[in-house]
Amino acid sequence: IAMSVRSLESAGDLDVVLMDMTCSFTLGNRIATDFLPAEEGDKAALVQAALLSSLADETPEGRSIVVLAKEQLGVRGRDIRAPEGASFFPFSAEKRMSGINWNGHQIRKGSPAAIAGFVASHNGKVTEKVQRITAEVSHEGSTPLLVAEDDRVLGVIRLKDVIKEGIRGRISQLRHMGIRSVMITGDNPL
């Protein structure tokens, strides 16, 4: 962090720059790229639940889930409406999940920890397979969101960061100047 003109003058001695991933490398939002079901043959149920749980989610991530789900289900925008009698559970940073209550069921999508707590409150648990999928998605640098209905996790949504246009060229320029760049982030321990 440049706090004075003097700090800028001494920047000529830099050989490493640490940059926060969000807003340095990325636009600060993520988009849904895949639905990974907990059980074979359950992808349609996962996609439908992800769509329903995202209908009232106005975050960039929530909107991207709706777009990807509509694409995979082959439905048009006008064909998507909240089911009659449904009530929404809005996203909040504290709860780290959002969803819908409909037809006697509670469908939620959110962080792995939030959804684990949600299914536990319904006497369910996150299976080893879902834990493995979650770890794989995290390990590749993406963000996993879990989707659950009542006591059962239906699967994982893979979110990828949107990289800023031209960032590769800028990092390459730093490298040519002899400056190593290191990306740091707080949202993925890996």
Image (spheres, helix red, strand yellow):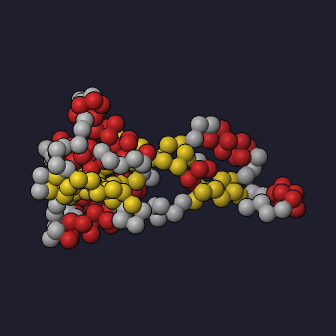
Residue at the (24%, 46%) spot, across then down: 52
Front residue of 80/160: it is 80
Using the rendered view, name the quadrant where residue 138 is placed.
bottom left
Using the rendered view, name the quadrant where residue 48 is placed.
top left
Residue at the (16%, 63%) spot, across then down: 151
Residue 11 is left or right of residue 106, and the answer is right
Residue at the (21%, 48%) spot, across then down: 49
**Relative to 63, does residue 96 appear above or below in the rendering?**
below
Residue 33: x and y in percent read 36, 41
Front residue of 150/38: it is 150
Residue 107: x and y in percent read 21, 55
Residue 43: x and y in percent read 19, 43
Could you tell me if residue 135 is visible in this image?
no
For the N terminus, which image quadrant? bottom right
Residue 117: x and y in percent read 27, 69
Residue 168 is left or right of residue 70, and the answer is right
**Relative to 55, does residue 22 appear above or below in the rendering?**
below
Could you tell me if residue 156 is visible in this image?
yes
Residue lying farthest to the front in this orientation = 85
Residue 79 is left or right of residue 68, and the answer is left
Residue at the (56%, 53%) spot, across then down: 22
Residue lying farthest to the left in this orientation = 104
Count of picture labels = 0
